Image: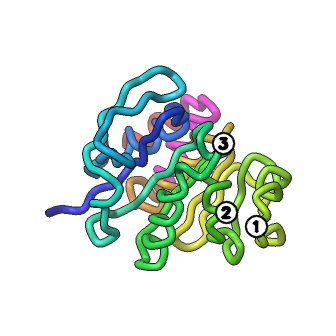
Amino acid sequence: MSKAVHLAVYDTLADWETGYATAFLARTGHTVRTVGLTAEPVTSIGGARVEPDLTLDALRPEDSELLILPGADLWDTGDGLAPFARTARAFLDAGVPVAAICGATAGLAREGLLDERAHTSAVPMYLDATGYKGADRYVESDAITDGDLITAGPTEPVAFAREVLGRMGAFEGEKLDAWYRLFHDSDPAAYETLNS
């Protein structure tokens, strides 16, 4: 079986947060598969119904290139998504990258995965409320990569994608910079660089 990028899907997932990353990973040759707690369809905040390709209990780090965890209301309303944070731990322990945005960063904080790694999120107080011990590793940034961990706040889907695409080698150097300038800054000059 060839490795895939795995996108976690669950009810209330913030569907706009991962769209740039998954679209451009797929366009550059990566297979993107969805993974849910169960095989039952989930509904995003935007009302999109998604049927998971596989269940979380069948997901193994050795079969994956990357685990992407989008934000969702459910990250802040109980521990129903904690299994995804535990899976993120297994991925990081196995040297497989994990990318978390918005509420998923709080899930990783609760799991202790941000205590020793540089990270960002919505605002420091949001993660402080989790009781985590990594406040001194918080970085005021749109998105950040620390080794195999990528984090971003809820307003930064393009910066999140930049980090993901760079980490996965989809775009590098000038092309990655041009991609970001095109989609973040609407810089028309970047289009030529990106497509050269």
Label 2, label 1: how far apart the Cα atoms are = 6 Å
Say whether marks 2 and 3 touch (CB < 8 Å): no
Q: Quadrant of residue 158?
A: top right
Q: Quadrant of residue 42?
A: top left
Pick the quarter of the image with the N terminus: bottom left
Range covered by the magenta-colored residues: 174-188
Image side of residue 96 versus residue 133, left or right = left
Q: Which residue is mark 1?
A: 132
Amino acid found under the numbered disc labelled 1? Tyr
Q: Is residue 73 magenta?
A: no
Asked whether 22 or 46 is in front, the reply is: 46
Amino acid found under the numbered disc labelled 2? Arg
> Quick check: 35 above or below 130?
above
Say whether marks 2 and 1 touch (CB < 8 Å): yes
Amino acid found under the numbered disc labelled 3? Thr
Image side of residue 138 versus residue 45, left or right = right
